[in-house]
Image: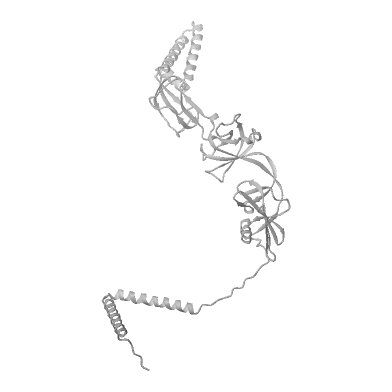
Amino acid sequence: MKHHFNPKVIQLLEEFIRNLQDRLQRIADAYWQLSPEKRYRIRLASFAFGILVLGFVAGRLTTVHRVIKTEQQDKEIVVEKSGMISLSMPGIALNPQIYQFEKASFQNVPQEIKVPGRLVFNAEKGKILSARVPGRVERIFTFEGAAIDIGSPIIELYSPEFNSAQQEFLLTYQTVKILKESNSLTNLLADARITQEAAFNRLRNLGYADSDIKALEKSGKSSPNLLMRSPLKGVVVRRNVEPGAVVNGGDPLMFLADPKALWFSGNVFEQDARRIELGQRIRIYLEAYPDREIVAKVNYVSPTVDAQSRGILIRADIENTDGNLRPDMYANGKLQIGSMQAIVVPQTAIVRDKETIYAFIRTSPENYRRIMVKGFDFDGKRFAITEGVEPNTELLVKGAVLLNERFTKQE
């Protein structure tokens, strides 16, 4: 039986074939016009594409459906509304190298309250350098943060009153010297010596050092400028004047302090006022040195409550022997207000979920229980449990986080 094709269809097919041949010819011409390196890259890419298609087809043809066998274990979990979870795992033994249990036992631990604060200079060992006579600041020898020694020059002050005091001393000094040469004026000599002593003390009260007075006796010349010296070894903490400033008697000029004598200044909350007293032990930790613990005793408790912070100020002496501590460093104190019974465990025994704290106990060889506990951080590395665990209970002390993950998965 002969098949007759539509002449139009045959014409369209022939035209399609001719167009395809023309395109293939143009592609071939363009290919051979390329450089050898580009032709090599095209052949390499075509080969890689062919391998990819072949791999895909082979994979589709050889897909193997494997059946994975799973072992079902009889596990029973009970979740209570309080958050406690009991888990039974028959036939499963926890790895003792990962999970360690110990029998819980009470021990005496210090009962402490947190006291935020900072380090400050010990004001009792600091000095305010004030103007003892009115005058004008001619020169400042040292500024904030500078180290000073006893007798170091601090400020030079021009003062006519000081100049008058020097002249008075020189006059009494010369009078005593003259009267010493005359043995017949002993009564006058005694009075002159009293006057000289008064002039000497006046110079000392104005801030003149004994060495300066001796130098004045030798030179016999007064000076209108008073050189004020440091009365201690330390640093300049605060400066209140500038060169050229006019000051009155009693005006504070500088505050000097010993950097090795510091205070911990902290605030105790108002509700803990009845628990604090002088002599209590306080452990102090610094943000700058988190691994360092400073132990001190409370030497001051404020008789008033701060109106803004509602806290009660307490202080404790700190010896900064190595010089590493600096005033205004933030510090956190733990004030011991007594002692109590608690079960002390490492932090690896504790699981925290927001504000809830959990621990794990073993009720039988194959049964475990997650319980809520109460307590406080003991020293950063340990936790003191005050409620929730009874003595002689098998308590998980290592691996609590891992076991909690197993509990939550089962839950």
Q: In which quadrant is the C terminus drawn? A: bottom right
Q: In which quadrant is the N terminus drawn? A: bottom left
**Quick one: 77 or 270, which is closer to the camera?**
77
- Check the image and name the residue furthest to the right: 392
Q: Position of residue 51 (x, y in %)?
A: 41, 77
| Residue at the spot 63% in from the left edge and 57% down from the top edge | 404
Q: Position of residue 370 (x, y in %)?
A: 67, 55
Residue 73 to residue 300: above or below: below
- Check the image and name the residue furthest to the top: 184
Note whether residue 322 is visible. no
Residue 103 occupies which quadrant of the picture? bottom right
Answer left or right for 382 relative to 190: right
Answer left or right for 32 relative to 229: left
Answer left or right for 107 relative to 52: right
Residue 108 occupies which quadrant of the picture? top right
Q: Position of residue 362 (x, y in %)?
A: 70, 57
Q: Position of residue 160 (x, y in %)?
A: 40, 17
**Quick one: 400 or 50, which is closer to the camera?**
50
Residue 250 to residue 358: above or below: above
| Residue at the spot 69% in from the left edge and 41% down from the top edge | 339
Residue 341 occupies which quadrant of the picture? top right
